[in-house]
């Protein structure tokens, strides 16, 4: 199944035809097409400060200018500021085809995300819209995402065995209840898999991110790839651990280890091999951001 110009995909074991709009959402999205990352850019809107889970590898920072990793931004924007920034970025940089929301917290745990998407849908109907989510609230928000024409969804899925997930997640906050351990990992996993299934059924283009954590989930990652490949996920992104917070003492995988893991997973699902672990306020082409902090609208 060649990356550019492919006309069909395998969804839950069945071949399905992709329509022209689905193809565009792959071919112009730099995270979903390696060729696109050289020609097209994305703009991340940091409108989502709050998170409903705590990963043992995650530290969020809302006043950060020196780091380049997920979970950081120079500032958090409100929906009106975000739309104003989108307006200026698209006017100044026509090669930017994608507007995404990837944090710095969990987009679907912030009402500002949905309000921003609503406004973007009204003002920029032709722009590709995407979100990155932990998936906990994806099943209950999927209809709104479809209404606002969010065609590309990334779900971070680090385990399909709750016993392994319990080692990765400190806690899960779900509808006012805090879950921990295997129970919390199970609640999260059930919603992640259900949300992915629902997104694929709605013809959304789904990418799964899996953080490669040596000694925790490394032997388990091919099983994740197999599972999501069978579900109809378009591409799979192995992300090396950034050693911080409770996993600060774990040595991250080397580039060679990452490549071998990708090769092991490639038999099950297409691999994204060009990820740069973008900030929540990244703007520009992957690896060639216009600037590392928020784009100024004034």
Image (cartoon, rainbow, N blue to C red):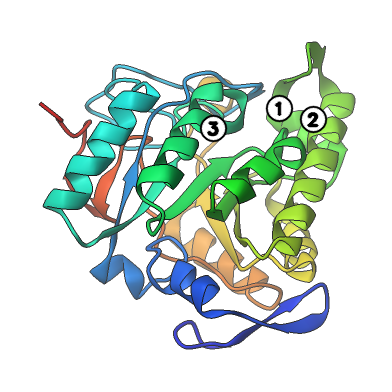
> Do the residues bearing badges 2 and 3 touch, measured as CB atoms within 8 Å?
no
Q: Which mark is residue 166?
A: 2
Q: Position of residue 208 (x, y in %)?
A: 62, 55
Left or right of residue 175, residue 21 in this image? left
> Do the residues bearing badges 2 and 1 touch, measured as CB atoms within 8 Å?
yes
Q: Nearer the viewer, residue 250 or 2?
A: 2
Residue at x 43% of width, y 71% of height? 33
Q: Earlier in the sequence, mark 2 or mark 3?
A: 3
Q: Position of residue 84 (x, y in %)?
A: 25, 33
Q: Earlier in the sequence, mark 3 or mark 1?
A: 3
Determine which quarter of the picture holds residue 13: bottom right
Q: Nearer the viewer, residue 43 or 74?
A: 43
Alpha-carbon distance for marks 3 and 1? 25 Å
Disc 1: CA contacts within 10 A as few (<14), some (14-19) or many (>=20): many
User: Which quarter of the image is occupied by the N terminus?
Assistant: bottom right
Residue at x 72% of width, y 34% of height? 136
Q: Which mark is residue 169?
A: 1
Q: Position of residue 67 (x, y in %)?
A: 29, 31
Left or right of residue 49, residue 57 in this image? right
The residue under label 3 is 114
């Amino acid at each position: 199944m060649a990356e550019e110009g492919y006309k069909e995909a395998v969804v839950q074991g069945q071949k399905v035809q992709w329509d022209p709009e689905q193809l565009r959402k792959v071919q112009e999205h730099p995270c979903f097409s390696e060729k696109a990352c050289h020609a097209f850019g994305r703009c991340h809107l940091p409108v989502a400060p709050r998170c409903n889970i705590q990963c043992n590898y995650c530290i969020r920072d809302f006043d950060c200018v020196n780091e380049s990793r997920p979970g950081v931004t120079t500032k958090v924007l409100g929906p009106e500021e975000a739309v104003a920034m989108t307006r200026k970025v698209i006017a100044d940089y026509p090669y930017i085809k994608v507007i995404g929301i990837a944090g710095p917290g969990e987009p679907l745990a912030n009402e500002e995300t949905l309000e921003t998407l609503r406004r973007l849908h009204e003002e920029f109907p032709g722009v590709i819209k995407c979100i990155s989510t932990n998936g906990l609230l994806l099943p209950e928000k999927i209809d709104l995402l479809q209404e606002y024409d969010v065609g590309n969804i990334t779900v971070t899925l680090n385990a399909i065995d709750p016993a392994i997930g319990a080692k990765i997640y400190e806690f899960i906050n779900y509808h006012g209840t805090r879950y921990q351990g295997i129970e919390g990992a199970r609640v999260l996993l059930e919603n992640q898999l259900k949300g992915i299934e629902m997104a694929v059924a709605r013809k959304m283009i789904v990418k799964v991110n899996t953080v490669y954590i040596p000694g925790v989930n490394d032997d388990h990652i091919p099983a994740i790839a197999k599972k999501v490949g069978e579900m109809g996920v378009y591409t799979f992104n192995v992300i090396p651990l950034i050693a911080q917070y409770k996993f600060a003492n774990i040595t991250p995988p080397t580039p060679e280890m990452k490549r071998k893991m990708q090769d092991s997973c490639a038999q099950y699902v297409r691999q994204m091999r060009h990820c740069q672990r973008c900030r929540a306020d990244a703007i520009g082409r992957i690896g060639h951001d216009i600037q590392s902090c928020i784009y100024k609208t004034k």
